[in-house]
Image: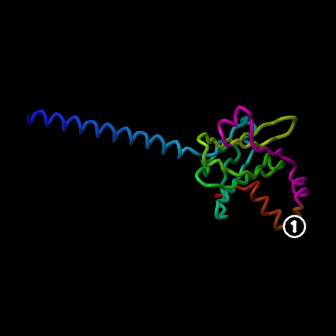
């Protein structure tokens, strides 16, 4: 009788350990996937090595965080917010002469296919920056896009003329955020 009781206890203990290990594995995999939500930059090497991208994240409280995402071919890991809404501004420059700002909101909270990809491509002698936030939008190439324009044209189109404001934008377009 005691032997039978020991077998039941041993079987029950083994089942508990198996369930615990499965839950641990599921939690580890789920958390790993959540931690992988970083921005990734794609494009031809000759474009990437001549491009600078600084990113400003504006969280749901209005707090701003500045980081460098790409600096002359070197990519930095920048985490993307997927749990709460955030607004992002990408300050993109190519060969320190073509610039633009790509703004988008990352409000796809309930989506389970976040990818946060940024594509740089050349089309019709123009350099484009494209943000695609969901894997399901990659096939459709559906995302936010801006074409880079000459720096002086950008400043003129956006009524940026005073030296202090120009200096601020020059830092965002051309300097690496430390």
User: Which percent across, then down, holds residue 54?
Assistant: 70, 53
Colour theme: rainbow
Q: Quadrant of the C terminus?
A: bottom right
Q: Is residue 63 above or below residue 113?
A: below
Element type at mark 1:
loop
27 sits left or right of 71 in the view: left
Left or right of 67, for residue 126: right
In the rendered image, the vertical position of residue 94 relative to residue 5, given as above or below = below
- 176 sits left or right of 145 in the view: left
Residue name at image x 28 percent, y 36 percent? 15
Place of residue 174 in the rendered image (x, y in percent of width and height, measured from the top left): 76, 54
For the record, the magenta segment spans 133-158
For the point 82% across and 41% down, which residue is it? 127
Q: Position of residue 93 (x, y in %)?
A: 78, 49
Locate the N terminus by quadrant: top left
Q: Nearer the viewer, residue 90 or 104?
A: 104
Q: Nearer the viewer, residue 136 or 153?
A: 136
- Depth check: give the residue in front, 1 or 176: 1
Q: Which of the 4 quarters of the picture holds residue 75?
A: top right
State the residue lying farthest toward the front: 1
Q: How many marks?
A: 1
55 is higher (above) or lower (below) than 143? below
Q: Nearer the viewer, residue 150 or 50?
A: 150
At 29% from the left and 40% from the top, the residue drawn is 16
Residue 8 falls inside the magenta stretch = no
Q: Could you tell me residue 134's position as x and y percent?
A: 66, 40
Q: Which residue is mark 1?
A: 162
Q: Is residue 95 left or right of residue 55?
A: right
**Label 1 packing within 10 angstroms: few (<14), some (14-19), many (20+):** few
């Amino acid at each position: 009788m005691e032997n039978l009781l020991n077998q039941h206890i041993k079987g029950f203990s083994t089942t508990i350990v198996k369930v615990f290990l499965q839950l641990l594995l599921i939690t580890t995999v789920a958390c790993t996937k959540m931690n992988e939500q970083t921005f990734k930059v794609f494009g031809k090497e000759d474009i990437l090595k001549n491009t600078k991208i600084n990113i400003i994240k504006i969280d749901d409280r209005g707090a701003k965080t500045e980081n460098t995402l790409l600096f002359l071919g070197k990519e930095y890991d920048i985490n993307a917010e997927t749990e709460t809404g955030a607004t992002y501004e990408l300050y993109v420059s190519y060969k320190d002469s073509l610039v633009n700002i790509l703004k988008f909101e990352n409000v796809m909270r309930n989506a389970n296919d976040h990818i946060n990809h940024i594509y740089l491509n050349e089309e019709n002698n123009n350099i484009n920056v494209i943000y695609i936030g969901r894997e399901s939008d990659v096939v459709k190439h559906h995302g936010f896009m801006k074409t880079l324009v000459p720096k002086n044209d950008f400043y003129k189109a956006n009524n940026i003329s005073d030296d202090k404001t120009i200096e601020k934008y020059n830092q965002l377009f051309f300097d690496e955020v430390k």
